[in-house]
Every structure is written in structure tokens, then in C-alpha cells.
Image (cartoon, rainbow, N blue to C red):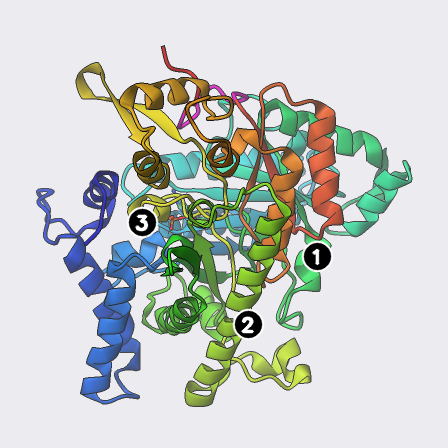
Amino acid sequence: MNLNENAIKVLEKRYLAKDENGKLLENPEGMFKRVARAVASADKESVSAEELKDIEQEFYDMMANLDFLPNSPTLMNAGRPLGQLSACFVLPIEDTMEGIFETIKNAALIHKSGGGTGFSFSRLRPKGASVNSTGGVASGPVSFMKVFNAATEAVKQGGTRRGANMGILRVDHPDIMDFITCKKNNADITNFNISVGITEEFMNAVEKNEDYNLVEPNTGNIVGKHNAKEMFDLIVDMAWNNGEPGIIFLDRLNRDNVTPEIGQIESTNPCGEQPLLPYEACNLGSINLSNMLKDIGGKTEVDFDKLRNTVRKAVHFLDNVIDVNKYPLPEIDEMTRGTRKIGLGVMGWADMLCKLNIPYNSQISIDLAEKIMYFIQDESKKASIELAERKGVFPYYDKSIYKDLGVKVRNATTTTIAPTGTLSIIAGVSSGIEPLFAISYIRNVMDNDELIEVNPVFKQIANTEGFYSDELMRRIAKRGTIKGFGEIPENIQNVFVTSHDISPDWHVRMQAAFQKYTDNAVSKTVNLKNEATHKDVSDAFWLAYKTNCKGVTIYRDGSRDLQVLNIGKVK
Ligand code: ADP
């Protein structure tokens, strides 16, 4: 198996089964076998023993070759007692003490199993509203969000990974200003990503520089007004400050809600790529685009046959996960099996572009992004239709838009672009649809030793072209870009661009290109240079709005004290 050192480290630390003394009970091969067997077993009743073995082998090969990986909880828990396989959940929060604390308990159970939770706090009465039963006053959504945050912190220790949450508040909630500024300090509410739920009405008011209404959630009464442009500028200011909050376009999420009769979409999962109904869960999986290439007479091309094949198998895999999954709550079981949503996406996009000799920040790459995602979307629907013929449509089909369209699918949604934070480390490729973060960087290892990590695609080309040296890689790590290095051919400088070489509008345009053919949403961070201005942030927000993105998250380099990776910061 072609796993690099970091991948093995990550797998050993968190994914491989261990006994009570921490001794490993399996190796990576064993993990993929365990997962393949558990997921294939969903077909037990419907195929012969021989066919079942073939399916298991197909699933195993696809993972072991790193062509496709399911989200982390599936790798960790499939075929093991916990059996919770989904990465994404959305839980409702009712405006009662019982309701709020019931949701905190449920979120804790989900975190323990490696899942992430998203919530809308929009139903909670605003700060200062009266509490009938006690005659006291309510403390408002932000104060309860802090309780959720503390609970997450406590569960962190015992779970498979640190819990992650998304908190959303509608822009017309009376406490919206408190919410927008609640993470101003980097040390506050650290277990949450927050996003303002933006409405079309609000965006129209911003454009016209008008006031918009603040609405009491329980009564629907208008309890105040605010200038929309000022509120928008406050969001921009806070995002510029440290990346929080992001924004999501709520009306767009609901425009694409395929089961509106079942419920409204009010939140996404923690990283924003998966809008869900209350009590709905979704399992994700990502195709490694860097492996979807072929060589024809010395020329590298996209291997659409392999991609088609991988999409078909991946849809089958993810659909099976729904059946073998053990859900943490009966409500989640009911909803998730009812809509059978899956989220197939991609990783290794930037690596693929480098291998194809295409700069990320170019019209050619935007066109290719659309072509590839159109293909994946189309093939995933065909696969879902075939599954429906064999196994039936999803149970809530009669309440979905597909019924009116007369299209019999097995899954209410099929595509989502996840961040692939850990999956991309396991596969050893660039994450999701993000550009390369660095060409080379210095990793501090034990005993203060410094290790130079070089992007493998770049290393190979540098060796072939004869300009590789450790000394050059060290200088590149210091500068954080290969722009302007005389020893590197110009076309290579243009192709191996990093996040910060790319202007914000290319980041947004790439997100929009993938969103165009994705059912759910796209996880993407619009990375800005430290010197970026408020106007740059505002422009990114507007471009995302105008190009039909479902939300946008920006991050200005260095704007949080703690950053996982630092580029250009070596002594
Ligand atoms: P991975 O690469 O581990 O499969 P991603 O980075 O693609 O995960 O994230 C996908 C989703 O998984 C997130 O949006 C979130 O719902 C969930 N998730 C990610 N990290 C965590 C975490 N530390 N705790 C809980 N859930 C998480």
C-alpha cells in the first residue's frame, strides 16, 4: 500500500483498532478490510455469497489504492462495536430549557462517536425576553452557545477526536450583533465555527442601503430595525479580524431543499458543506482526483473511464453505509434512512492540476472544474437511479421534488465537497478543492530537528528537470512561494501556485465552479494575505453571492494567533 509516513502516523494515532492497553490490533490493510467487509454486508440479503465477496474486494481496492476514502467516522467505526459512520449531523434547538439541554446531551453522544454537529440558535428567544415560568429574563442564544461549547470541551478528552460544531443565527434575530461579535476574541467559543444565516431580503436591503427588520422568533413580531449595510460591514469587519463569522445563504439552501415537505433547512454541519434538516445525518466520501489521470503517449489526461467507475462504486459504498450505520438517536435513524442523503466529493484537485500542467488561477482550470464536477454529478445520479431500480427509492421520495420530476433516485442528494482535513493526509494529496498550501515547508520534529516537507508532485518534477536541492527547498519554505526563483522554469512557477499566490476572486470562482454541479455545498476557505483590506473581504462576499455560492468563509493569514501550519515563518 502506498501510504506515506504522515498517513501511517495519523492512522495509528486515531483510526486503527487498539486494545485497552493501546496496543494496535490491526494495520492499515486490516482497517480497509474491516471497513470493506462491514459496508459490503449491507448487500448480504440481495446477492449471492460470491457476489458479496466481489463487492467487498471492490470496496477494499478502491480504498487501499487511495482512489476513494469515506469520511473519518466510517474508517474508524465500521465493523466495530460503536458502528457510528457519519461525519455530519444537524440537531434542532427548541426554545425551552428541556429542549436546549436535551440537544446538548445528544450533541455529546454524537461527538463521542466522531461526528460533528450543526445547530441553528435562531428559535431561541432573545436576550432579555421574559421567561413565563420563573418571571426571570432569558439570557439569549449566545449565552447558550457558550454552554454547548463547554460541553464539547469536556467530551473532547474521551472521544475519538475533538468535537466540532457549527452555530448559525439568522441575520434577522434580535441578538444578531452579539452573535456576529461573539468570537472577536480568538480564545472564545473555540469549539464552534459560526455563520450568519443570510436571507435574500437582507442582501437586497444591503444593496439598496436600507433598513431591515429584526424579528422575535416565537411571535414573528418585528421588534426592531437595523441598517443592513452597517450590519454587513460589521460581519466583514469581524471576518477580517479573524475569519469568524462566515456567512451562509439560507434561502439558497432551502431553494435546493429536495424534501421541503419534510422540513426547512436551518443549519449545516461544522465545516459548512452539508446543509441538513433537523435530526438528519449524512455520510461523506471523497474521490482522489490526483489518481484519476492516465498517460497517453507521454501526455497526461483525465481518465474519465476510471472516474466513472470510481463514482459508481463510491455511490454504492456510501448508500450501503446508510444501512449498516448505527445512529445515535431514533430520530436521526428515522430521518437519515428516510432521505438517504449521501455526499460524494473530491480531494487532490490542486495536485491533479499540477500534474496536468494547469495553473489553479486560470480559466482553463475553472472550465475543467465544471467539466469534472458535472461528470461526477451526472454519474452519481445514474448510479443512484440504478440502485433505486434494484433496491427502491428513498422512503420520503413521495414528499420530494423528484416525484414531480418523475426521476426515481435512491438518494435525496449525492454530492458534497468536504474539506477532507484528515482524509487528504491519509491519501497524501492536497485537501478538497483547495490550492496547494505550500510547495515546501519546515516541520519541527522531536529534539528540535527540522524536516523539510516537499509537495510530492513538485519534488518529482524538480528531480526530473534537475533543479532539486534541499537548499532550494529550504529557501522556498522561507519565502512561502516559488515565484521569482530564477532556477525554476517559468511555466513551473505558474503552475505550482500556492494559496497566497492566488487572488481571492480565483478562490471564490473555483468554489462557484464546483458548486454549480454539487447538490449540497462546497467547503472552501478563501485565503487572503495578511495585508488584505476590509474591501477585499467584502468583495469576496459579494462575488460569492453573485456567483451562486451557498456560503463563504474567509481567512486572513496570521489573523488568529494559533495556526496549524506557518509558511514563510522559518528562522
Ligand atoms: P475527514 O477528512 O476527517 O473525513 P473533513 O475535514 O472532510 O473530515 O470534515 C468533514 C466533516 O466531518 C466536517 O464538516 C464535520 O462535520 C466533521 N468533522 C471534521 N472534523 C471533526 C472533528 N474534529 N470532530 C467532529 N466532527 C468533525
| Magenta stretch bounds | 558-565
Image location (x, y in percent) of residue 466 = 31, 32
What amino acid is found at the position of numbered circle 2 in the picture?
Asp
556 in the magenta segment? no
Q: Residue at x 30, y 35 (%)?
A: 463
Q: For this view, does 16 lie left or right of residue 305?
A: left
Distance from disc 1 to disc 2, alpha carbons, whole Å, reads: 21 Å
Question: Which amino acid type is marked by label 3?
Answer: Ala
Viewport quadrant of the C terminus = top left
Q: Quadrant of residue 436?
A: top left
Q: CA distance from mark 2 to mark 3?
A: 25 Å
What mark, if any, has residue 378 been given in the picture? Answer: 2
- From the image, tell me which residue sits under label 3: 427
Of 164 and 310, the residue lying toward us: 310
How many dots with numbers? Answer: 3
Q: Secondary structure at mark 2?
A: helix
Eyeballing the image, is 280 above or below 207? Answer: below
On the image, numbered disc 1 is attached to which residue? Answer: 252
Residue 262 vs 107, above or below: the answer is below
> What is the spatial separation of the Cα atoms under label 3 and label 1, in whole angstroms?
33 Å
- Which residue ends up furthest to the front in the rendered image? 297
Task: Confirm whether residue 80 shows in the render.
Answer: no
Q: Is mark 2 within 8 Å of ligand 1?
A: no
